Image: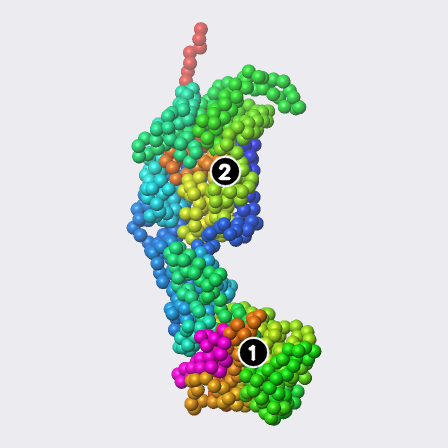
């Protein structure tokens, strides 16, 4: 009887080997498929029940924190002053996923990032619950708040950058939303907020206009045309076209100055005056003289066509469009036609001029912190390009100072020299029916810049068709600059 | 695998019985105590980890659970020392570790489900304290079996009685009205007596094994009689097919009446192995597997519940939130556990239905990973192979057959349940011995282990020690006695 018994023993071992083999298949070979399967809620539940890292402003003010709860998801995401900081933080929702910074730095915040590896190993040994790392931003909490308040009631964006480093000091987008509602553990509250925020015919508050929307830059683009001209040897006294209106070559379409005003003597004007008065004809003709290649090259040096830019949010690509024929080159010269920029791009442009032509990589994550708030890494200023020679940048700055003097609108600051350029960008099929976007790009103090900003108010805010960059956007920009310089 | 089989192959019968008369073999009880202490240590660490991960603090609850467990271990060890001193020293520690790990996992699932409302409307009540109580009761049975049954061969005398009882126990829930034998989760295998319910099938398994072993041993010659020879196989005579057909019929009836595929498969497999071991003829296995295949195909064609199981096995993603939900959650848990697992208390067993019974091995795979699941499988393998080794060593055929059957039953049951939760074979819903929550399973399996220990004791105990002969002086030293020459 022993032989069959031994064979049965052998059969038992074969069965166990089959089980072990199959367990290897399920738990090792197919493990990733099963773990990442959308029907598998484990990874999700784990993340939501882990103590997520904080997001804190430059001065240490907490922007996003967690609160212990008694329910199954053990931590609730809390956003202090949620709507003002929503473009910065994004949201963390148990139903609708993550968005914005919460998404791009999710691995770090939820603690699974490789940069936290050493910490995770020690958690494994001590059996401590893994915690997420934290982010310290470059955002100036007070400035963000001011900018948000100034944009109340309008649709638009403010981006402020420290020119020397590329640190983003403020990034506001309105109308905004409350990420607290989307992070709620009350599923119904979440759903209600989600439906409201994502309604097709609603104001789309979750769109981060600073980096995700592109707009025609209008006259603010003249700075880049001027920069291209300066590189070609022009100076502030170079004579440019001063006619009140010109006809686009090969068409009957006209291109007038704002309110058909003349520049200079009505035939020519200095480059400085043309920029200060924002003469369309001058820059349209100048653009044509420079040609699309040089324009595009200069625009690229200022950050156009960079689809890779992340701050770490990915930034929509600013573009010149095809510029296929002469009329479109004329129109591109005044920032119309197919030229499109993000508010961030315009702020970066101002910052580049302020920084003597050196374009710094814009960013808003200053430090990556371990759960115990020790610094894991710090963002170093990174020069992306030399857009202008320093002396050309100084010339352009002087012209912008003249432009600011020539710009109307309220809220002018005393004791501070601002260098600025306004823009009133027409858009849509019928420019007489669509209110123009109001732009203001500036930096201050002009002699030693500390802040560069771009402001856009979509469709001219409440001013309607008569809105201009000077009237609508400039007061907001000046207030933001004033708040920043005044607090120093 | 560091299993003892090569040793068992190399040391046949003689190893255990080669002890010279008068010299007692070592009882190995100290080894057992050492291994038990090791198991207890592992279980204690596991329990502390679970509490720390789930509650962030250690509560008094684990002290009570831990003490109860240690108490059970101590009593079991003392019982073996007293009633089966030569028993195999590895079997009990394996059981203790599995039982302890099961308790930890059941407790861990309690923590996850604490406060959950059940679909029926009630509230989740902790299962771990009940399991501790069941373990204590199981231990009493364990002691009774060891104490009363001083020689396993006694069982053979009551073979038919056991067979009858087993059959009754097996079929009872299937035929009784549903107020006493309710259908739970689609299977009609419980007898419900108010607050508690039992699964007679678990006991029937052992009773029928005793019967078959006794029956086959007494009628062994009958079954080895040659029938026709076909394709190199000695087919048994048609009239001798009776027991096999009966077993097949019983298996099918379990499947049909009680919708319990797992038990049906387990039962049929055990009978087949007993027949094979008793007759040493592979023809029985070929015949049996053939009959099983026919039965399985017919059942698949006829019964919806069989089709669903097969469908879930072939493609669980076909109905991921309905019929395939259970097996998918099991696979997700296993996959998420990966090689080293989510850590005790770190997984999501509340995502898997029936986590503390049929799917407890999936929870282990999730929290302890492939490594932990493999360790559990190896433990079962060691347990079954030790049982098998003792069956090789024991001297009587009934002991060999019964021990072999019991050992195979453990291994086969694990194959069915773990194969089910890892989608190697269709999920059939039976418990993992010693791990799963459930009183009947625990009681029956502790009795099974008592029998294995009894058989191993018989294998290793010295033959009844011969009486020392009276000392006689050497012949040379004998006095010379004058004897009168017979006339």
Crowding at label 1, few (<14), some or many (≥20) Cα neighbours within 10 Å?
many
Left or right: residue A10 compared with residue A330: left
User: Marks 1 and 2: same chain?
Assistant: no
User: Residue B379, how many percent across, how many down?
Assistant: 47, 42
Label 1 belongs to which residue? A218
Q: Which residue is mark 2?
A: B427
On the question of residue A358 being in view, the answer is no
In front: mark 1 or mark 2? 1
Relative to B46, residue B241 above or below: above
- Magenta segment includes A485: yes
Q: Are marks 1 and 2 in contact (CB under 8 Å)?
A: no
Q: Residue at x 50, y 84 (%)?
A: A443
State which quadrant residue B444 falls in. Answer: top left
In the rendered image, is residue B314 in sight? yes
* Magenta residue span: A459-488
**Closer to the camera, A58 or A306?**
A306
Residue at x 44% of width, y 6% of height: B487
Q: Secondary structure at mark 1?
A: helix
């Amino acid at each position: 009887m022993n032989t069959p018994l031994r064979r049965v023993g052998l059969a038992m071992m074969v069965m166990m080997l089959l089980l072990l083999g199959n367990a290897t298949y399920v738990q090792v070979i197919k493990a990733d498929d099963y773990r990442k399967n959308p029907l598998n809620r484990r990874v999700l539940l784990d993340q939501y029940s882990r103590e997520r890292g904080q997001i804190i402003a430059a001065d240490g003010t907490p922007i996003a924190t967690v609160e212990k709860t008694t329910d199954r998801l053990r931590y609730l995401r809390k956003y202090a002053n949620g709507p003002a900081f929503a473009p910065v933080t994004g949201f963390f929702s148990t139903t609708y996923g993550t968005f914005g910074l919460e998404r791009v730095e999710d691995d770090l915040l939820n603690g699974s990032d490789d940069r936290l590896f050493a910490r995770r190993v020690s958690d494994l040994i001590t059996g401590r619950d893994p915690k997420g790392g934290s982010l310290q931003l470059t955002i100036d909490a007070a400035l963000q708040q001011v900018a948000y308040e100034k944009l109340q009631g309008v649709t638009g964006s403010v981006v402020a950058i420290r020119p020397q480093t590329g640190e983003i000091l403020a990034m506001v987008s309105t109308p905004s939303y409350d990420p607290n509602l989307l992070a709620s553990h009350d599923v119904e509250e979440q759903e209600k907020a989600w439906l409201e925020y994502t309604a097709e015919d609603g104001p789309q508050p979750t769109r981060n206009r600073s980096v995700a929307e592109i707009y025609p830059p209008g006259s603010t683009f003249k700075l880049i045309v001027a920069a291209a001209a300066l590189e070609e040897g022009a100076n502030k006294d170079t004579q440019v076209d001063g006619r009140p209106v010109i006809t686009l070559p090969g068409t009957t379409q006209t291109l007038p100055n704002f309110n058909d005003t003349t520049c200079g003597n009505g035939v020519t004007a200095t480059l400085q005056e043309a920029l200060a008065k924002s003469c369309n004809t001058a820059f349209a003709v100048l653009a044509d003289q420079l040609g699309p290649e040089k324009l595009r090259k200069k625009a690229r040096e200022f950050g156009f066509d960079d689809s890779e830019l992340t701050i770490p949010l990915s930034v929509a690509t600013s573009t010149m469009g095809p510029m296929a024929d002469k009329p479109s080159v004329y129109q591109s010269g005044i920032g119309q036609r197919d030229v499109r920029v993000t508010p961030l791009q315009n702020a970066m442009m101002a910052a580049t001029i302020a920084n003597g032509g050196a374009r710094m990589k814009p960013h808003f994550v200053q430090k990556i912190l371990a759960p115990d708030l020790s610094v894991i890494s710090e963002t170093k200023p990174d020069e992306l390009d030399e857009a202008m020679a320093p002396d050309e940048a100084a010339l352009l700055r002087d012209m912008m100072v003249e432009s600011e003097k020539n710009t109307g609108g309220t809220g002018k600051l005393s004791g501070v020299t601002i260098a600025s350029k306004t823009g009133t960008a027409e858009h849509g099929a019928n420019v007489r029916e669509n209110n123009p976007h109001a732009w203001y790009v500036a930096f201050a103090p002009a002699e030693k810049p500390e802040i560069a900003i771009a402001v856009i108010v979509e469709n001219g805010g409440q001013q309607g068709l008569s809105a201009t960059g000077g009237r609508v956007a400039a007061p907001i920009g000046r207030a933001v600059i004033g708040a920043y310089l005044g607090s120093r | 695998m560091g299993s003892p089989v090569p040793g068992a192959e190399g040391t046949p019968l003689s190893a255990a019985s080669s002890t010279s008369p008068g010299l007692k073999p070592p009882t190995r009880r100290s080894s057992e105590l050492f291994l038990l202490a090791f198991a207890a240590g592992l279980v204690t660490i596991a329990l502390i980890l679970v509490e720390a991960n789930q509650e962030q603090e250690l509560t008094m609850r684990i002290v009570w659970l831990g003490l109860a467990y240690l108490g059970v271990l101590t009593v079991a060890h003392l019982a073996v020392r007293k009633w089966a001193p030569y028993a195999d020293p590895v079997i009990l520690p394996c059981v203790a570790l599995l039982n302890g790990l099961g308790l930890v996992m059941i407790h861990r699932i309690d923590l996850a489900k604490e406060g959950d409302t059940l679909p029926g409307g009630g509230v989740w009540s902790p299962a771990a304290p009940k399991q501790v109580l069941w373990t204590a009761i199981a231990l009493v049975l364990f002691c009774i079996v060891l104490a009363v049954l001083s020689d396993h061969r006694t069982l053979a005398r009551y073979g038919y009685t056991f067979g009858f009882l087993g059959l009754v126990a097996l079929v009872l829930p299937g035929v009784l009205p549903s107020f006493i034998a309710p259908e739970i989760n689609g299977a009609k295998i419980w007898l419900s007596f108010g607050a508690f319910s039992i699964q007679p099938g678990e006991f029937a398994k052992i009773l029928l094994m005793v019967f078959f072993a006794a029956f086959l041993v007494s009628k062994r010659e009958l079954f080895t009689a040659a029938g026709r020879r076909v394709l190199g196989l000695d087919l048994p005579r048609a009239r001798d097919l009776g027991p096999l057909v009966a077993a097949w019929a019983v298996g099918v009836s379990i499947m049909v009446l009680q919708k319990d595929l797992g038990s049906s498969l387990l039962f049929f497999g055990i009978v087949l192995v007993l027949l094979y071991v008793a007759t040493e003829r592979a023809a029985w296995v070929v015949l049996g597997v053939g009959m099983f295949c026919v039965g399985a195909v017919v059942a698949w064609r006829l019964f919806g519940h069989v089709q669903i199981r097969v469908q879930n096995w072939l493609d669980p993603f076909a109905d991921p939130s309905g019929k395939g939900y259970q097996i998918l959650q099991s696979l997700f848990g296993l996959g998420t556990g990966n090689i080293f697992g989510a850590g005790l208390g770190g997984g999501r067993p509340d995502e898997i239905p029936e986590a503390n019974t049929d799917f407890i091995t999936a929870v282990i795979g999730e929290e302890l990973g492939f490594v932990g699941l493999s360790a559990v499988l190896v433990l079962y393998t060691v347990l079954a192979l030790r049982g098998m080794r003792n069956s090789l060593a024991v001297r009587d055929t009934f002991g060999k057959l019964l021990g072999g059957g019991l050992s195979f039953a453990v291994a086969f049951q694990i194959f069915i349940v773990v194969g089910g939760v890892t989608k190697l074979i269709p999920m059939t819903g039976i418990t993992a011995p010693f791990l799963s929550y459930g009183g009947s399973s625990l009681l029956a399996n502790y009795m099974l282990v008592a029998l294995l220990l009894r058989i191993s004791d018989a294998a290793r105990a010295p033959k009844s020690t011969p009486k020392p002969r009276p000392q006689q002086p050497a012949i040379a030293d004998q006095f010379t006695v004058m004897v009168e020459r017979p006339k």
